[in-house]
Image (cartoon, rainbow, N blue to C red):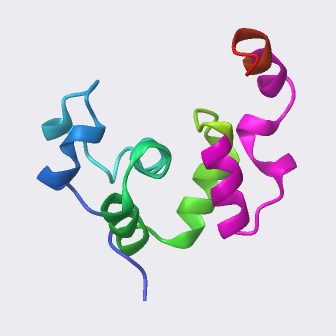
Amino acid sequence: MKKTLPKRIPKYLYRFFWDVNVKKLNPQKYPYFVIARLLDKGDLKSIEWVRKNFPEEIIKNTLENYRDFSLRSANFWGLIYQIPLNKIKCFQTPYYQTRKKLWPY
């Protein structure tokens, strides 16, 4: 059964989208942004919402193609979804090298 992507972000998740007008944010149009933000910055309840509302394939594609994950978070989700680090965007050269120059910790 194919999942229908949500059209809105629930109010209890608004706090993770402090930099956008969350009332206008459509997860159907911007699933990668929504998934990345919640997996990277969210809590247990937000992660449950992502996993319930988005197909695993879209979640994996987000990890592989969206570079704005923290390295710790990307490593964790890579282990959960069995994605090698060399396939996760934020670990790929040159992005990884640039990140280390800007924040060497």
Q: Is residue 75 left or right of residue 46?
A: right
Q: Quadrant of residue 81?
A: bottom right
Q: Which residues are magenta?
A: 72-98
Please tell me how many numbered marks the rendered image carries: 0
Q: Is residue 85 left or right of residue 49?
A: right
- Residue drawn at x 42%, y 81% as measured from the top left: 2
Q: Quadrant of the N terminus?
A: bottom left
Query: Horizontal and vertical percent for residue 20?
Result: 26, 27
User: Magenta segment: does it hold 92?
Assistant: yes
Q: Nearer the viewer, residue 104 or 95?
A: 104
Q: Residue furthest bottom?
A: 1
User: Magenta segment: does it hold 79?
Assistant: yes
Q: Nearer the viewer, residue 100 or 7?
A: 100
- Residue drawn at x 61%, y 40% as measured from the top left: 66
Label the magenta part by its dominant secondary structure: helix
Q: Quadrant of residue 21?
A: top left
Q: Is residue 103 above or below residue 95?
A: above
Query: Horizontal and vertical percent for residue 86?
Result: 87, 47
Query: Horizontal and vertical percent for residue 64?
Result: 70, 49
- Residue drawn at x 65%, y 48% as measured from the top left: 74
Q: Quadrant of the C terminus?
A: top right
- Residue drawn at x 17%, y 56% as measured from the top left: 10
